[in-house]
Every structure is written in structure tokens, then in C-alpha cells.
Image (tube, rainbow, N blue to C red):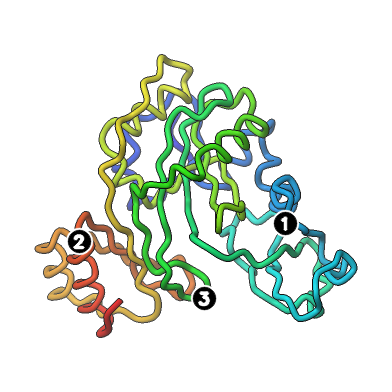
Amino acid sequence: MPFVGVLPEREHIFRPEPRREVGVSDAAAWRLNPDYRHVYDKLHLALDAGLTAAPCGVAPTDLGIAADHEVFVKPITNLAGMGLNARTVAADAVPVEPGSFWCPRLQGTHTSTDCLVEAGAVRWFAHTRGSEQKDAARPVYWEIGADAPEVEPWIADWVQRNLGGYSGICNIELIGGQPIEAHLRGSNGFFDFYGPAFIPAWVALADGEPFTPPPPIPGGFVISVFGEADLNDENLQAAKTASVDVQPDPSTPGRAAILRCRDRAAGFAIYRRLTGHSL
């Protein structure tokens, strides 16, 4: 059975294939893992981490949040783009919005960690750090293979408590060391940088075969080109010459393309060429 939910332009990454169905998209992962669907409940995730949070309709001021403080409002569960409809509002202006909740607006470094998990225990971490530069709260670029040992004990404990018995991949995103999202899939856009041993190791876990953790990932950068980009043939050839992969992105609102590269300077130079401005 193949990986499920792979975009056509990314199929070359997902080799070899597992014997059983393995979700690559959130919708597929939710469907295929009925015992662990609770991780997609972002309100539960926030409360489990000790954050003050509640469904919309419960006023933040009733739970001790000052009226002029900012809180984040987002859907409790959203498989069609986990960040969709998320926004910051004042605590006294939280809408009565069915299916959404609020939590404190977190500050600090945004990390995304993929974990290979064996029977509820994390056996391998791949950390990615978001840039301080943002577009509508979205990091403009990600550093794959970042050092983030400070978050590993919290993640390992969370996985043990929430994914006991699970074997496969999961992802958890943190801001300032506090969770914002969890997934029963990995950061598919970063897999190019995980090295050749990654997919076989993941498949072995999924199929219940003997598992050897992959080596530390080589790393690289994924840069989002938000707004408009000049994707003419000359610019695309320049990117190819600089070993920068350019993937047009018609699916993500407000993003014209994704750049993938090993060398940060080369990626930034192609970004400047496509957009006319520097990072």
C-alpha cells in the first residue's frame, strides 16, 4: 500500500513505500489512526500544556485574562490547513465562533519537530527553527537541522503520555517552548533535507520491522516567497545553477513559491531575484 496524501510533485521523495497505508496529509493521518486522533484537538493540546484556554463563548476576562491582552483564536480541529482562520484579537473581542477556541498569544522561537516514534517512545528528532521574519505570523524561512535540545524532554514526555503504543512519525510545533499544533505526519516539505536513511527508517517503523534511527540530518533551508514572484525561465535557470529548487505554490494563499537549498546565501540571492527585495 502506498503513502496516502502525497502531492504529485513530491512523489519522488516517498520511496520505498510501506506495506500498509501511511498518512502523509493530516486528513489521511487522522483517518488511518483512530486511536490517536485526539492529538489534533488543539484546545486539548493547550490545556494539557497548562495554558489558559477555552472554547469561544467563554470570555477570557472570566478566566483572569486582562481585557487589553492579545489572545489567539483558531479552530479547535482543522485538517484542511491547520493555521487557517487563526488570528490575534484583544481578549475582550473574542468572537462567539462555533468550533473555535482561544489561548494566550505565545511569544518566542517557533520550532517544528518531526519525531520517529517506536511504541510511544521517541527514537529520533529532526528540529526546524522558524525565522524571526514573519508574513502574517508565518515564518518567511525555516532552518532545517537546527539544534534545539531544550525542547526534547518536553516533547518526549508529551509523546509518551499521548501516543503510547504508537509507532511511526509525528510532528509537534512549539512557540517559546509551548505547543500550538500536533500532527500524526511529518513536515513533508522538509523531507528533502533528512538524508537517504530517513524514509526507509520511517517505513520500517510503520511496518513493524527492525528499526535503526537515521543519522543526524544534513539540514538546509526552506524559504517561502510570499506575495508575487517573477518565475520566468531566466530566473528559474539561475536558481537551478545556484542549486536552489523552486517549487511554485498555487495551493497556499498568499505564497507564490517555495525555495529549497542547502546554502542560505544562495537561497536568499534567488529570493531577491524573484521578488526584487532582500530578506
Which residue has dot 3 on it?
Answer: 136
Q: Circle 2: is it few (<14), some (14-19), or many (20+) Cα within 10 Å?
A: many
**SS for tag 1?**
loop
Residue shown at 64% from the left, 26% from the top: 164
Q: Earlier in the sequence, mark 3 or mark 2?
A: 3
Tell me the kind of residue under disc 1.
Ile
Question: x, y percentage for residue 45?
Answer: 69, 48
The residue drawn where x is 62% and y is 29% is: 160
Secondary element under disc 3, as helix, strand or loop, is loop
| Residue 38 image offset from top left, x and y in percent | 71, 41
Q: Inspect the image, locate mark 2, and give the three-letter code of the amino acid beneath it.
A: Val
Where residue 76 is drawn, which disc sits there? Answer: 1
Which residue position holds label 2? Answer: 244
Determine whether, in the image, residue 67 is placed left or right of residue 125: right
Q: Which corner quadrant of the image does residue 238 belong to? A: bottom left
Give me the residue at 63% from left, 31% from top.
163
Tell me residue 236's x, y (percent). Answer: 17, 69
